[in-house]
Amino acid sequence: MGLFELLAINAAISIACFVALWLIGIAIKDVTFVDSWWALGMVVLALASFIETGPATPHKIALTALCVAWGLRLGIHLLLRWRRDGPDRRYKTMLGKAETERHWGFAQSSLLLVFALQAPLQFVVSLPVQLGQAAPSSAPLGLIALAGLVIGVIGLGFEAIGDWQLMLFKRDPANTATVMDRGLWRYTRHPNYFGDACVWVGLFLIAAETRYGLWSLPGPLLIVFLLTRWSGVPTVEGRMRRRRPGYEAYVQRTSGFVPWFPKRI
């Protein structure tokens, strides 16, 4: 299968899935579940690429296994959080604003502001697991790919532990008005986002040893941008500054993204 044929088939699969999910969102008047599809959709694209590109090779196995492990863990975590906590206020506010200010209905606003935006972003971020499988080689993993696998596994563990620690913290009613600064959160304000970035940098390094893998560089660059400059860190920190009185002090002593020892103030 050629490169462009692979990408075209995967794009069609992605669009079909997003359209189906959009229709479900219209039916239940909630789009919060799209957060879990951000991860689960990557799994679908990785598995589709694995099937479409022929026999299994070391690079294909490493790319698909790491992506599936990351995507299932995060996707199920976010899906359970949605079922436990209900609709996300971010989406309710955004779609409600579109309805009052632009006079858009739920179907139009959810399509244009949520699904039509996330679909291309997801496709670009997932380029390492697509392009890295487009020209499979039987060669064993080289040093770059092995380094990427190590970085990716560390990132997966870092993200999973950070989410688990935060979940336990939130379950305690005594922590309602306090700031999470324990465990991994003592060394970075966003261990989950840092781990997420490491996974996709690792996937890129694995893909970089393949014929088309270097062309997937926009994927890790985009996810790092999204996490640090757009929908990740800025959104969370803006909300925390408004709601948690001790968050400013936490910001002053704790690394913003890359883990490091806290400053003494």
Image (spheres, helix red, strand yellow):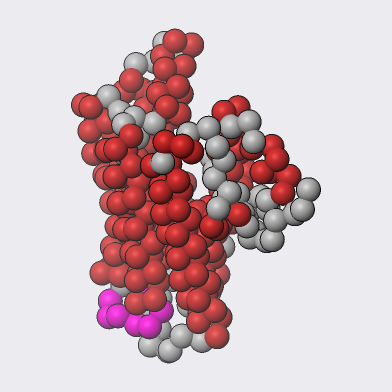
State the residue lying farthest toward the right.
Answer: 265
Residue 11, given in percent of the width and then of the height, sits at 35, 51
Quadrant of the image containing the N terminus: bottom left
State the residue lying farthest toward the front.
Answer: 174
Q: Is residue 145 above or below residue 109?
A: below
**Visible in this render: residue 128?**
no
User: Which sits in the foreground, 45 or 149?
Assistant: 149
Q: Is residue 100 magenta?
A: no
User: Which sits in the foreground, 234 or 95?
Assistant: 234
Residue 84, given in percent of the width and then of the height, sits at 29, 38
Residue at 37%, 54% in the rendered image = 74
User: Which sits in the foreground, 227 or 42?
Assistant: 227
Count the numbered circles shown.
0
Residue 68, given in percent of the width and then of the height, sits at 33, 64
Residue at 34%, 71% in the rendered image = 65
Residue 224, given in percent of the width and then of the height, sits at 58, 53
Residue at 45%, 53% in the rendered image = 165
**Visible in this render: residue 179?**
yes
Q: What segment carries the magenta color?
A: 54-60
| Residue 251 sits in quarter | top right
For residue 90, side relative to residue 205 (left or right): left
Residue at 40%, 48% in the rendered image = 168
